[in-house]
């Protein structure tokens, strides 16, 4: 995954927006202790959750959106579905990942 897409997925999973939440996240990183072990555990569990918890369709769309950087419109055209279907599928996939990962930290 690219750095930008990782940040977007992390923000989506944690519920942060690009406003005050991002500023708070930056402050916590600067003030906090080394959390590299937690980050590595989160990454391992994210991959495990993608394999175990997501439907095939959710996993594919999350891969296309976050790993390959395709837009929702591009995914919709590729998969021959409405853009709203892509949006809903990504949202449900993120929700499933968030639920699974909240117990891993």
Image: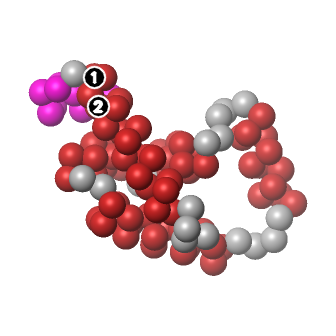
* Residue at image location 34% in from the left, 32% down from the top: 88
What is the C-alpha distance between the residues marked 2 and 1?
A: 5 Å
Observer able to see residue 4: no
The residue pinned by badge 2 equals 86
Visual colour scheme:
secondary structure
Residue at 50% of width from left, 47% of height from top?
Answer: 9
Residue appearing at x 41%, y 52% in the figure: 96
Dots 2 and 1: beta carbons under 8 Å? yes
Residue stretch rendered in magenta on the structure: 72-81
Q: Secondary structure at mark 1?
A: helix
Residue 2 image offset from top left, x and y in percent: 45, 50
Q: Quadrant of residue 87?
A: top left
Question: Which residue does the image show at 87% across and 60% down from the upper left?
Answer: 31
Could you say which quadrant of the image residue 68 lies in? top left
The correct choice, above or below, for 65 with respect to 75 in the image is below
Kindly give the residue lying farthest to the left in the view shown. Answer: 80
Seen in the picture, residue 14 relative to 86 is either above or below; the reply is: below
For residue 62, above or below residue 102:
above
Q: Is residue 60 magenta?
A: no
Q: Find out whether residue 73 is within the magenta segment.
A: yes
Q: Which residue is mark 1?
A: 83
């Amino acid at each position: 995954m690219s750095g930008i897409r990782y940040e977007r997925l992390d923000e989506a999973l944690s519920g942060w927006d690009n406003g005050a939440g991002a500023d708070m996240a930056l402050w916590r990183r600067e003030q906090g202790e080394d959390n590299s072990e937690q980050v590595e555990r989160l990454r391992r569990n994210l991959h495990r959750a993608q394999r175990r918890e997501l439907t095939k369709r959710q996993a594919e769309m999350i891969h296309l959106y976050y790993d390959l950087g395709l837009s929702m419109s591009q995914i919709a055209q590729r998969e021959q579905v409405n853009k709203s279907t892509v949006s809903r599928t990504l949202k449900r996939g993120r929700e499933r990942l968030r639920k699974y990962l909240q117990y891993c930290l």
